[in-house]
Image: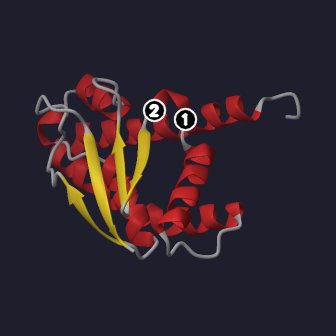
Amino acid sequence: MESIDKRDLRELLCMGLMTHDGMWFYNLFQECGAKTASTLNRAAIQSMSTFEVPRLKKVMGVDEVTTYEQLKTSSKGAFELIGADFMQFRRQYPGNNVVRCDAPEGQCFAYKGVKRIGALDDYDCGIFYRVEAWLKALGIGFRVTPEVHGCLMYQGKHGYREYTLDM
């Protein structure tokens, strides 16, 4: 284990988790259809966040997240721990309690996977929903722009969200 680079280990573990998520979604899609798969995927994300956020806070030594700067610092730390390079998920913190998240044009890994299995018609984005579940688990209120149902990339638009935080 000592000879394995931490970044390589993180990539491997994250790929394994995302493969599990993808195969879970695919099999549910095959059995129940895209709408049910999408609905249950989002329910699982919401449920998972109640475990994931406290675990991340603990491992990073974070007691509370009540300010924009604390959110910025803890979010960066969390994504360094569980985000993988292949995801290409970007976060920006322009100030004024705003967080902007996006994937490079045409590079959303979830969009590519859901497109590959043919489930985009009824897919509701789980990537940004995870960000929203984290905010809820932290007790942070927010407004999101744009409010989207479905997948922006499937609609021919850039996949992004901007969150104005109640902090």
Labelled disc at residue 87: 2
Q: Does the rendering let one see residue 12?
A: yes
Coordinates of residue 142 in the picture (x, y in percent): 30, 68
Amino acid at the residue labelled 1: Ala
Tell which of 42 and 53 is nearer to you: 53
Amino acid at the residue labelled 2: Met
Instruction: Classify the position of the N terminus by image quarter.
Output: top right
Q: Is residue 120 above or below residue 61?
A: above
Labelled disc at residue 111: none
Residue at (15% x, 45% y) in the render: 150
Coordinates of residue 46 in the picture (x, y in percent): 37, 63
Instruction: Give the quadrant of residue 7.
Output: top right
Relative to 61, is 78 on the left or the right? left
Relative to 115, is 12 on the left or the right? right
Coordinates of residue 36 in the picture (x, y in percent): 20, 51
Relative to 108, is 134 on the left or the right? right
Q: Is residue 71 above or below residue 8?
A: below
Q: Which residue is mark 1?
A: 84
Residue at (24% x, 40% y) in the render: 29
Residue at (53% x, 63% y) in the render: 69
Instruction: Classify the position of the C terminus by image quarter.
Output: bottom left
Residue at (65% x, 69% y) in the render: 62
Tell which of 59 and 28 is nearer to you: 59
Coordinates of residue 144 in the picture (x, y in percent): 23, 59
| Disc 2 secondary structure class | helix
